[in-house]
Amino acid sequence: MNKIIEARKLGPDTKLFRIEAPKIALKRKAGQFVILRVLPEGERIPLTIADSNIEDGTITIIAQGIGKTTKTLNALETGDYIQDIVGPLGKPSHIENFGTAVSVGGGVGTAIAYPTAKALKEAGNEVIGIIGGKSKEYIILEKEMNEVCDTLYPTTDDGSYGYHGFVTTKLQEIIDSGKKIDFVLAIGPVPMMRAIAEVTRPYGIKTMVSLNPIMVDGTGMCGGCRAIVDNKTVFVCVDGPEFDAHQVDFEVLTQRNRMYNPQEKNSLERHVCNLERMAQEAEKCQN
């Protein structure tokens, strides 16, 4: 079992966990992920390693409570334990001195954009960060991104903070300003990554996207993360998770990303009903 050294809320339904995992902390590189199981009877889910500390043997992950398992995870606090963690998995981000690199994080995707932005900066790049959220409360890791980026643009859909607009619009404005951009990494919801790919395509800017949203078991055995890249079938968890955005078939990717929606909805509804029942029983005992 792995002890939670720190649990901290970052935003609505979004939580940061610093977890004891010394062997993973020693080996992990930017772009890699872990597979964790919260409870013995629970499912295994992939989460990107946002950071690590070799000295105290911890890794940092960030989870958004969307489904049953992530909501169960986000109910844990400092001092609690996670059943097990396996990693690091996946191929690390390809890092080199491209020149000027833009790291784009949409919502909780910033948890993946941050370690790559940090690695790009350490490789000698000028790093521009663009992080987005529906509103100010959904902007995460702004302080951390500020520390590794030469320039950072927070954006909000509703204009409550930073730039009023989407991350794609901000990226287009930077390109239109005449700034030479040599590399873009985009991580977030599939529609956002697809839109980023279309922004950079006309300019021939090398663009990578992380397809973490469609991963299931992280070993390539379940086949749930099949994607089409450069007209070839790949397994995101073992062949990626990062791929050339201009070669990804986003139409197929979108269809596959929606495949398990009914099952996930039913599982979450049962989970919520059980929580409500337990709360009602607890209230009766108190009365």
Image (spheres, rainbow, N blue to C red):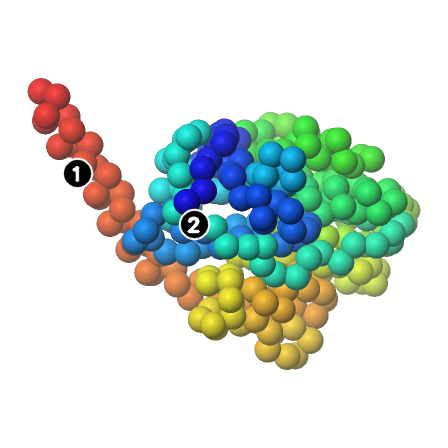
Along the horizontal axis of the image, is 123 left or right of 271? right
Residue extending farthest top: 287
Q: CA distance from mark 1 to mark 2?
A: 28 Å
Furthest-bottom residue in this view: 232
Q: Secondary structure at mark 1?
A: helix
State whether residue 236 is above or below residue 272: below
Tell me if label 1 and label 2 are in contact, CB under 8 Å.
no
* Residue drawn at (45%, 54%) of the image: 45
Which residue does the numbered mark 1 point to in the structure image?
Answer: 277
The numbered disc on residue 40 is none
Name the spot of residue 99 as percent of width and height, x first: 89, 50
Q: Residues within 10 Å of mark 1 (few under 14, many from 20)?
A: few
Q: Position of residue 205 (x, y in %)?
A: 82, 59
Residue occupying the point 62% across, 54% down: 32
Disc 2 designates what residue? 84
The amino acid sitting under disc 1 is: Arg
| Amino acid at dot 2 | Asp
> Does residue 237 appear to the left or right of 263 in the view shown?
right
Q: Locate the N terminus by quadrant.
A: top left
Residue 224 in view (yes/no): yes
Asked if 137 appears above or below 275 in the picture, the reply is above
Identity of the residue drawn at 58% across and 29% down: 136
In-image side of 100 versus 166 (left or right): right
Under circle 2, the secondary element is strand
Q: Position of residue 20 (x, y in %)?
A: 52, 39
Q: Which sits in the foreground, 61 or 207?
A: 61
How far across and down, in percent of the image, does residue 135 sit? 56, 32
